[in-house]
Every structure is written in C-alpha cells, then in structure tokens.
Image: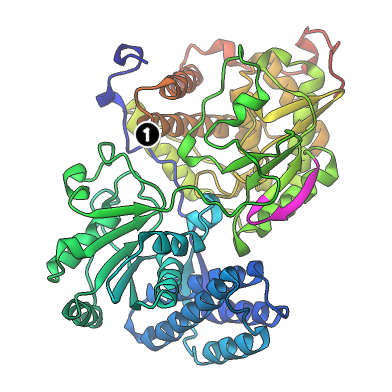
Amino acid sequence: MNSSDSPARETLNPELLIFRDSRRQVGVGELVARLSSDLRQLSFPASPAQLLHVLLLAGELECALADIPTPASYATAAAAQLTSLLADAALACDSRNHLPDASLLAHHSRQILQSISYSGVVSVSAPEGFAYYALHPLDYADLVARLRLTNPQAFVVGIRSIGTTLSAVMRAKLQQLGIRADRITVRPTGHPYERTCEFAPAQRQAIASARAFDAQFIVCDEGPGRSGSSLLSVAEALEQQGVARNRILILCSHEPDVRALCAPDAERRWRRYRCAATEMTRRLPPNADEYAGGGEWRRHLLAPEESWPAVWPQMEPLRYLSSDGREMFTFEGHGPYSAAARARNRALSDSGFGAAYLGHEAGFGCHLLPPGRLLRRADLTPALLAHLAEYCAWRAREFCPANVDCGELEIASRSNFVREFGVARDGLELAVERPTICDNRMAPHHWLAVGGRVLKLDAALHGDDHFFPGPCDIAWDLAGVIVEWELRGPARDCFLSAYQCASGDDPRSRAINYELAYAMFRLAWSRMAAASVTGNEEEARLMRDDQRYRRHLQCRTSDAADDWAAPQGAAIWKRSTDCAIRY
C-alpha cells in the first residue's frame, strides 16, 4: 500500500476510545472462599489444568490485595506466598519431576488462606493475556530455561496485574534451575503512554540487597502494548535505584516493533535494555495442527479471488485448524477465564444457531467446521433477515446478565464523536431494556452457509471482553446487522419488525442511538487497528472499513438523510423471497 492510498497519518486520531474498564468490585472473603473451594476439588494426583486454575485465582487475589493501601500488607504477603506455592506445584507437575501431593497442597494452601483476615472490597479484572491472548504462564518458565542465565541470584519484578502470576512462575523456574530468586510486583501509574514506577520503601530495600549480590533483575509483563511505557518505566526505575543497565532484562510475550511504540522517545529507550519474548505458545490441544490466527483463517474459509474482510491481527483470538480442516480451535481463556465462553458455546451449539461445540482443552474451544462458505452482503434475502432477527431474539433470551449499565459506553461514544467530528452528539442515551451479552460479530463473514443452514461463527468471545460494548442491550447486535449488512429504509424496517415478531420487544425507539454508537466504535476500532499495521494490505482493508463507518455516521447524522428513513411495514420491501439457501 502506498502512502497516497490512505489518509495522512496525522489525521488518524490514536485517542479514540475502544477499550472498556472491565474491573469489578468483589469482597476479599468471596475470592478466598472460591479459591478454597476449588482447592478442595483437586484430584489425586492434581492435573496440570487444575493447578493452572488455582494458580491463576491465587494470582488474582494477590494482585487485588497488592493494589489496596498498606493496611492489607500482611494479607498481601500471605497471598504472595500462596501464589508462589501454587506456581511451584504447577511447574513441578508440568515438568513431571514431581507430581504434587494434592491433599497436602490443598491443606497447606487453605492454611495460608485462613491467615488472610482482610475483609474489605477489592477491584479485580481478568488478566488480558490469560483471558484473551493465549498467554500461558508456564511459557515464561520455558523462556527462562532457554535464556540459560548464569547469575547465581535473580530478582524478579512483575507488573500487575498479570505480573503477579508471571513473577511467581519465573521465580519457581529460577529456583528449579538452582538460581536463588526473590520477587516483587508493582503497578506503574500515569497516562498509558507515559507510565511512571515508584517502589515502596520495603521494595527499595530488597532491590538494594539484591544489587549487592550482583543479581540479575528481570522485569516481566505481557505485551508490550502500543506504548511499551509500563515495561520501560520499571526498567528505568530500577536504574534510578542503582541497578546497572546490563543487569536488567525485560521479558514479555512478543518482540515489539520498537519504531511503532508511542511512548515518548520509545525506540531509543527500549534499545537500552536486553529483551526476550516467549512468542506464540506451544501448549496446544492435540490436533491443533495448522495456524489460523492473525487473519490466516481467511485463507482456509474464503476463495482466493474473494475480497478479504479486515482483521486486527494482534488482537485476534489465537486459532488453529486440524490437518483435515474439519475442526477449528479458538482460544477461549485459561482456567477460570474460560468458563463463560464455554457455557455460551455449549448453548449456541445446542440451539442449532452455532457450529457444533466439541469441548475445551488447553485454553482452546473446539468447533466442528463443516464444509460451507462464508456469507456476503449479496446473499441478503428476507428469509436470511428473518434468521438474523431470530438469532438476536434467542441471544437476548439466553444471555441476559443482571444490573447492566451502559454509562461508560455512552461516555466513550460521545467522546469519540467529539474527537472524530469536532461536535458533540447530544442525546446519545443508550437505554437498556433487553440486557444481553451481545455477539458483537454480526458481519456477513461471521456466518457460514452449510447446505440449507446458516451457522453463526465466533459468537461467544467478543461481547464481554476488554473492548466495548461489554454487557449492554441487544440493540447493539441489531445495530451490528444494520450497519454491517448495510440495511437501508425498508430492509432495515423489515429486519426490526422480524426481531419484534420473534422477541415481543420493539427496539425502534433505541435502535438509532445504538446504531450510531456501534458505527462509531467500529470506526474507532478500525482506526486503532490500522495504526498498528501500517504500510501493508491490512491497513488498506482497515481504512476501507474506517471510511465506510464514517460515511454511515455522516449519513445518519445528516439532516438530508432521507434515504435512511425506515417506512413502517415490512411488506414494502419488494425483494423476492425466493432463496437459494433455506434458513
């Protein structure tokens, strides 16, 4: 793609909002009780999957306690002890050197839990790498082994939240290799592109002690993200504590393009330190033979001459195909972070709306992928519209969470309007009448035509992840159909009427605002994705979508948008009801 093929780079606004705050408030007692209960369920001998599950819960508890003020310091120390204990067990089980005694491990772990007397409320969120990006904590143990460190002592600094678990795993591996290791965790603060790190007094003392023994200092986190500023802030803070630069090692999940990092002077700062990355996990289910992530699934499901839909390669769930192409493996989450996606996939499979779900292993859900073709906008018929409407109605009945609040989504949508168009979009309220975990993937290429049926693909992961919208009203998915299938006038009205018929819910009074919010989010998403893949065909596809969503918004907000009016009554849509595919 030539530079003349896309808008000037300075016109792309990187500050459009696409990520939501997925933190939730929960009592420490509830976290302790859940972990204690799961520890009781350990089999003899404990399986790798069971140990991973409780390790991730322990890391979540440690992180939550570490993020609150010092009155909980004793509880934080106990939680850190538990995370380290379970990391030792998980690593021993993984290496087969010594299978942990599940009964003894559970007893010891529950004793530690009983010492956590803090009874307050804490903020927790799913670590993104474990929940969405197929980062296995033991991949960091593998990386440590490959590095062949020679220092007899190491000091690990994990960046919260995910760094709690990663630092415990790395400490366990270092100890296994005969290297004495200590660990701490920190949470850098400030603007996402300019994080700063401050060590607590006790941490500074521990750093000084390790420095006196000429320890190797290892900073670990997932990422780096768009800026790299969290990892850089910790490495630089260590230097400020007198640690020699050549004693600092950054470990992360992938090698960044340092020229694209958007922290101030990021390239020069990053190149000052040694860095190593785990890269893609090798911990896969059996039969996950052929890589299909990063948009590679398009090579298998679309004909060579077809125009490919755009993807954001770095943000896609990791996918694999079986060697015969009959099974698709999609990352759903490790341990406790896969439960909701697994339940939704089972419901989709049982309903007949989704492809057959064959189960979950090693963090991946497996679907049967029958021979078929992905739909295109040209396939649209009244019968297909009715099927899409029935799917939305079913989803609103099946996946209906309680206490849904779209306040954050409203604020982000209004902010994006101002940043993109320079004017406020007043009255953009997003009413919640049918709370739903939406699909958030309603474009034609997410539907597979198989003989006389249409199956929904990729339908369990994206309505409740770290992107907007999060739990909201089913009108978000209705808007997704309208925008992605480019429904106009009578076609739009036909679709909304079919949904009302299937659900008893009239969405017309709230559909337009959700349509605007949806198109604005997709524009922002496409814009952010394009900024991460500059200079290639994927950027061109993403900017094509960016312009399509922008045109939709301009038409929808124009006083002259008569073409967008939705006349009452589906009968005015004169398109033939004959279908090549029966829905």
Residue drawn at point x = 62 percent, y = 81 percent: 100
Q: Can you identify the residue that label 1 sits on?
A: 532
Residue drawn at point x = 60 percent, y = 26 percent: 298
Q: Is residue 169 above or below residue 498?
A: below
Given residues 469 and 505, the one toward you in this image is: 469
Q: Amino acid at mark 1?
A: Ser
| Residue 304, quarter of the rendered image | top right
Q: Is residue 107 visible?
A: yes
CA neighbours of label 1 inside 10 A, class few (<14), some (14 to 19), many (20+): some
Given residues 355 and 432, the one toward you in this image is: 355
Horizontally, is 185 left or right of 133 in the view?
left
Horizontally, is 510 left or right of 559 in the view?
right
Prevalent SS, magenta region = strand
Horizontally, is 361 left or right of 184 in the view?
right
Residue range in magenta is 356-364
Residue drawn at point x = 35 percent, y = 31 percent: 531
Q: Percent from the top left, x then y, of residue 60?
A: 50, 70
At mark 1, the secondary structure is helix
